[in-house]
Image (cartoon, coloured by chain):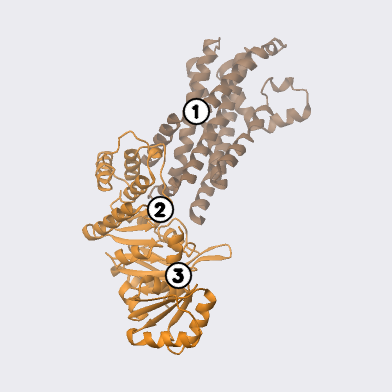
Amino acid sequence: MRTEGDIVSESVEDRSILAEGLVRSFGDLRAVDGVDLAIESGRIFGFLGPNGSGKSTTVKTLTTILAPTSGVARVAGFDVTKEQSEVRSRIGVALQEVGLDDLMTARELLTLQARLFGVDSIKARRAAEHLLETVGLGRVETKKRVGAYSGGMRRRLDLALALVNGPQILFLDEPTTGLDPVSRKDIWNEVRRLNREEGMTIFLTTQYLEEADQLADEVAIIDRGKIVAQGTPRELKKEIGEEVVTLTFASARAAGRAADALRSMAPEQRVAGNEVICYFTSAADKLPGIVRALDEAGIALEALKLMEPSLDDVFLRATGQRLEVQEEQE
Amino acid sequence: MTDVVLLVIRSLRNSLRTPAALIPNVAISIFFLFVFNYGLASVADLPGFKGSYLAFIIPVSIVSASVGGAGSAGQALVRDIESGYFTKLLLTPSPRLALIWGPMIAGAILLVGQVVLILALGLAIGLDSATGAAGLLVVLMYAFLWGMAFAGYAVFVALKTKNGAAAEAATFAFFPLIFLSTTFVPKEYIAATWLKWAATVNPTTYIYDAMRSLLIDGWRATPLLIGLGVVLAFGTLTGLLALRQARRSTQLG
């Protein structure tokens, strides 16, 4: 008889992160509810979802910070429950909440972290200098304590700490949340470099669709603890159609009426607020009919957009809500 | 072992970078030393009282220092938990024991530093140790072990509450222990039966006895061994509580 563990072990050689039926509960709440993952080595994996969807809890479970309630997960070939030390030695983690000691200097923090990974004192100091240069903090005054760093500097130092052991797999939990566009682009470039030059597998959670679209080879969308869509960005977009027509109305009520009026003409559709989003293989020949149908139903159309599908459309289709709205609200 | 040393050095360095957090505890211990020594010195005139009152009261100053000193270990841990740095440490392959021993040992070392200062002040105002310098070193050892034991309790509370104010309050809840004992007079002079009983079951009494025997009587095995047994038992209990809580906190989130 095969157990869950056996199933995972069979395919461990060609997968760097695997999870089967991963569950993490807090009391009655299942924050992670049966997540399955199979991420190949050397990929950038984008884990997309709104706040509270279970992204960070999944990361904490995969990185041994939280024990899973049930299910199996192997990271770098090791079981996250039974072989925690082996997992920790091979991963780097930068969580959403930057974890630094404000009383220490950047060099002290990096050197200590390296030493706790078993690196000798001289190599640890050398690694600290190298990493500070890598993340653009090499010129910061040596004696400056971390408490005096700006938000962007703290985020970069946190990333350096995650790299101190030369990890095979890097977990980045919303690495660019709260950063200005320039710092965000810097992080993206560094993520690409680490993946390309160091061959690191990167597990990146984000609520920014553009970030996932720009960086990820493969994307999974998580909502209320469950994965609701998974694939390459291209595959996911293709699944919902070649073209997307977004119709904007004066009110949500008008949008609801319009959705009913267009149901036969556009069976693949979603309503989000005062918008109706329709998915077509080819939309151009449908547009005159749409406008006519709305006119006949007496519904005033405020705007019409014809676009290629985005990851937000994928998200909307999978979850029934837009992620972009939340991004704008931040 | 290396990890423990690294984490002790880090904790000590951080403590020295925040002297404002150390000064009140040192000041309270010195305050106790002077106020009790000069205010209650006539206790030494009671018939049958052995040695100087200074030698009798110095252990009170040391034990009061241990409560505050141990609290610093808990405070340091809460600060790490609140800042997220403790999670960063949890992500290293370091044993969980090393992560809690670091602040505990650092707290005990800081306590020894305070005790050296208290003893130096005591010597300056006339302390005459019956066991000489060697006896003072043994007093330091008791202070270190007592500090470790209290630090275990402080770390347990810190991990349990993950809250700075709660950890501080729980540490100072131990303060009355200092006074429900043979704090100001030997047990035979305590009139109230309930206080005598409290002094008998209070582990602090046996730490006082061990230190006072060194400072007043000379080398006597019985109080030293009982004191050692009590401090080791108390330390083992608080250490196990801290370790169990560390495992719970880090595994169950």
Left or right, A264 with respect to A193, comes to right
Q: Residue at x 52, y 11 (%)?
A: B124
- Residue hosting label 3: A322
Q: Chain of mark 3?
A: A
Q: CA distance from mark 3 to mark 2?
A: 20 Å
Q: Chain of mark 1?
A: B
From the rendered image, report the letter of the chain displayed in orange. Answer: A
Q: CA distance from mark 2 to mark 1?
A: 33 Å
| Tag 2: amino acid | Gly
Colour of chain B in the rendered structure image:
brown
Res A104 quadrant in image? top left
Q: Where is residue A239 shown, x and y percent of the image? A: 35, 80
Q: CA distance from mark 3 to mark 1?
A: 51 Å
Instruction: First in sequence, mark 3 or 2: give its number.
Output: 2
The label on residue A178 is 2
- Of residue B235 and residue B107, the one placed in the foreground of this image is B107
- Of residue B5 and residue B74, the one placed in the foreground of this image is B74
Disc 2 secondary structure class: loop
Q: Where is residue A275 shown, x and y percent of the image? A: 46, 75
Q: Residue at x 28, y 65 (%)?
A: A43
